[in-house]
């Protein structure tokens, strides 16, 4: 599959992967900041953004997409950074294709099974009847009736696209994402542990990574470091971008050491 992407800068390659319902633009600000030292590639994962739609949707196939992306762009190894679902894709690449990964950064997600937590978002998205929608404002009004967070609604509305007849539609493949959601909330499919340098970044106000998750993380990623960004929730890169950038630069530059902070 040919993934949509943007690239910034020159240097060692760094691939950044977004989360569920996201797209490469979510990480563009971070990518531009890192472009002074790295060739940064932000990608739209399959069924998201401007990448192709497919009925196949799980971590193994998405990891294979990333390896294919690397090969098609002429490099064999790269640093990997992924947020939430994208973090699980990055973990899958590291365990299944370890020779392709130099350093791994996982933002606010553990390799474990998560209880379904996005039903309310799926319901809100499915409630939009595009046959009677004539503007983006109408979509926003429908979503705000069911989602009480304006920031989440703004994030979801990045997925609105024009259809061939001039109306509107979801850019993401909502039907497949919903039908295959168990594949996304499930565990990373463990291969051999990845013993390369690994940084887990968690939001201090986010429940996605707890200290109870550390034994599994350490088993699968024996050289992992866990850092906490105190003032951030799950959207670490949006809420505390400067702190995240400092930690990413420090880790890729070999400064961060230790196990948990």
Image (cartoon, rainbow, N blue to C red):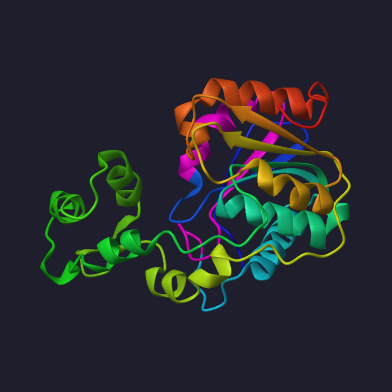
At 52% from the left edge and 33% from the top edge, which residue is drawn? 237
Quadrant, the C terminus: top right
In the rendered view, does 63 fall on the left or right side of 96? Answer: left
At 74% from the left edge and 40% from the top edge, which residue is drawn? 13
Q: Is residue 38 magenta?
A: yes
Q: Report x, y in % for residue 72.
A: 73, 58
Quadrant, the N terminus: bottom right
Q: Report x, y in % for residue 26.
A: 46, 41
Q: Which residues are magenta?
A: 25-51
Determine the image quadrant of residue 129: bottom left
Determine the image quadrant of residue 14: top right
At 62% from the left edge and 29% from the top edge, which residue is drawn? 228
Asked whether the viewer can see residue 163, the reply is no
In the rendered view, does 18 fall on the left or right side of 261? Answer: left
Q: Nearer the viewer, residue 22 or 49?
A: 22
Asked whether the viewer can see residue 143, the reply is yes
Q: Nearer the viewer, residue 11 or 130?
A: 130
Q: Report x, y in % for residue 43.
A: 57, 50
From the viewer's perspective, is residue 11 above or below residue 162?
above
Q: Is residue 63 magenta?
A: no
């Amino acid at each position: 599959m040919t993934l949509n992407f943007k690239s910034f800068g020159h240097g060692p390659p760094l691939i950044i992967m977004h989360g569920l319902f996201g797209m490469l633009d979510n990480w563009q600000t971070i990518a531009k900041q890192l472009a002074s030292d790295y060739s940064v590639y932000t990608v739209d994962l399959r069924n998201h953004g401007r990448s192709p739609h497919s009925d196949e949707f799980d971590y193994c196939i998405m990891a294979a997409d990333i390896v294919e992306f690397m090969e098609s762009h002429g490099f064999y190894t790269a640093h990997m950074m992924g947020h939430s679902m994208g973090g699980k894709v990055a973990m899958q690449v590291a365990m299944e294709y370890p020779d392709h990964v130099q350093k791994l950064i996982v933002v606010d997600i553990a390799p474990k099974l998560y209880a379904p937590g996005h039903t309310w978002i799926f319901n809100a998205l499915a409630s939009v009847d595009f046959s009677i929608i004539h503007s983006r404002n109408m979509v926003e009004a429908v979503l705000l009736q069911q989602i009480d967070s304006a920031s989440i609604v703004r994030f979801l509305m990045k997925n609105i696209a024009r259809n061939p007849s001039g109306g509107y539609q979801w850019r993401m493949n909502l039907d497949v994402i919903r039908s295959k959601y168990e594949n996304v909330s499930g565990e990373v499919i463990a291969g051999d542990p990845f013993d390369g340098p690994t940084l887990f970044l968690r939001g201090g106000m986010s429940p996605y990574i707890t200290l109870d998750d550390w034994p599994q993380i350490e088993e699968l990623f024996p050289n992992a470091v866990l850092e906490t960004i105190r003032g951030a929730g799950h959207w670490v890169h949006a809420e505390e971008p400067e702190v995240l950038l400092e930690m990413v630069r420090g880790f890729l530059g070999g400064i961060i050491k230790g196990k948990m902070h």
